[in-house]
Amino acid sequence: MKEYIYPILLGYFIGAIPFSFIVAKLKGIDLRKIGSGNVGGTNVLRNAGALYGGIAFFLDIFKGVIVVLLVKKYGINAQLLAGSFAVFGHCYPICLKFKGGKGVATTLGMFFGIYPYAALVFLAIWIFVVGITKYVSLASIIGLLSASVFTLLMGKSYWMIFLALSLFSILRHESNIRRLISGNERKTDVIAIFFKREQKKE
C-alpha cells in the first residue's frame, strides 16, 4: 500500500508548491492580480521578465522530475502516480485555494523523469510552434499531444497516462482555445524576451 499512498501524497504536496507565484512575489508581483491572472510560468515571463520567468519555468518542471525520481524504487506505476499527482497539485494547490497553473511545465517534468525522449519531442515542437506563431498556448497544446503520440509510437505502455495528463492540461486551456479560434489570443515573443535580456547584460 505504501508504494501507492506515498507517491500520491509526495506528488501532490511537492506539486502544490506554487513556485511561479513565489518567484513573482519576490519581485513584488501578485500573479493573481496581473496579466492573465494565471499562476503559471508564462504569466511570470510576461510580467516579471526573462530571469524570473526562466526560474519559474525551471522550478515548475523540476517538481515533475523530482517526484518521479524519488519514488523510482517503487516501480513505474508509483512514478506515474507521483507524476500525475504533482500535476494535479500544481493545478490545484491547497495554499492558493486550489487555483493554480495549467500543468504544462510540471507535465513536461514528469515526461523528463519517466521518458526523456518524449520531453525532448515536446520541447522541439514547442520551440518551433512558439517561434513561428508566438502563441504559447498553441505550442503547449501541440507539444503535449505530439509527445504523447511519440510515446505511443515508441511502444511505451504508459502512453495513455501521458495522453490523459496532456488532455487534462489542454482542457485547462479552454479559454485560450476559445481566444485562438476567435483570433484574440495574446501573442508572446518568448525569444525576444530572452534576447532583450541578453542585450541588457552586454
Image: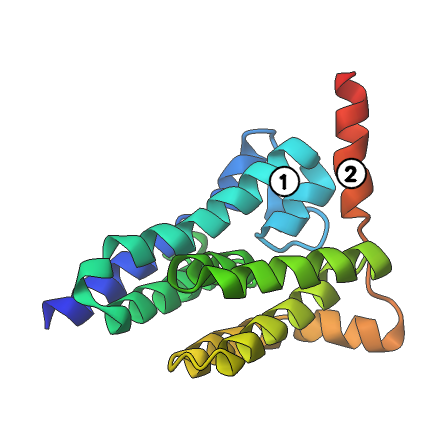
Camera-side residue of 163 and 6: 163
User: Under tag 1, what secondary structure?
Assistant: helix
- What element does badge 2 sit on? helix
Q: Residue at x 64, y 67 (%)?
A: 143
Indicate the quadrant containing the N terminus: top left, top right, bottom left or bottom right.
Answer: bottom left
- From the image, tell me which residue sits under label 1: 53
As drawn, the residue found furthest toward the top would be 202
> Residue 104 in the image: x percent, y percent?
56, 62
> Mark 2: which amino acid?
Ile
Q: Which residue is mark 2?
A: 193
Q: Is residue 109 left or right of residue 200?
A: left
Residue farthest right in this picture: 183
- Left/right placement of residue 70 relative to residue 36 reads left
Determine whether, in the image, residue 13 is placed left or right of residue 144.
Answer: left
Name the amino acid, label 1.
Gly
Residue 72: where, in percent of width, then height? 24, 59
Q: Is residue 34 visible?
A: yes
Q: How is the image coloured?
A: rainbow
Q: Is residue 83 above or below residue 201?
A: below
The Cα atoms of the two marked residues, 1 and 2, are separated by 10 Å
Q: Work out whether residue 29 can be spotted.
A: no
User: Which residue is situated farthest in the left direction here?
Assistant: 1
Which numbered disc covers residue 63? none
Q: Please provide percent x and percent y for residue 168.
A: 52, 76
Q: Residues within 10 Å of mark 1 (few under 14, many from 20)?
A: many
- At a point 33% along the width and 70% down the height, the residue shown is 80
Tag 1 and tag 2, C-beta contact below 8 Å = yes
Residue at 84 percent across and 61 percent down: it is 133
- Count of marks placed on residues: 2
Q: Is residue 158 above or below residue 115?
A: below
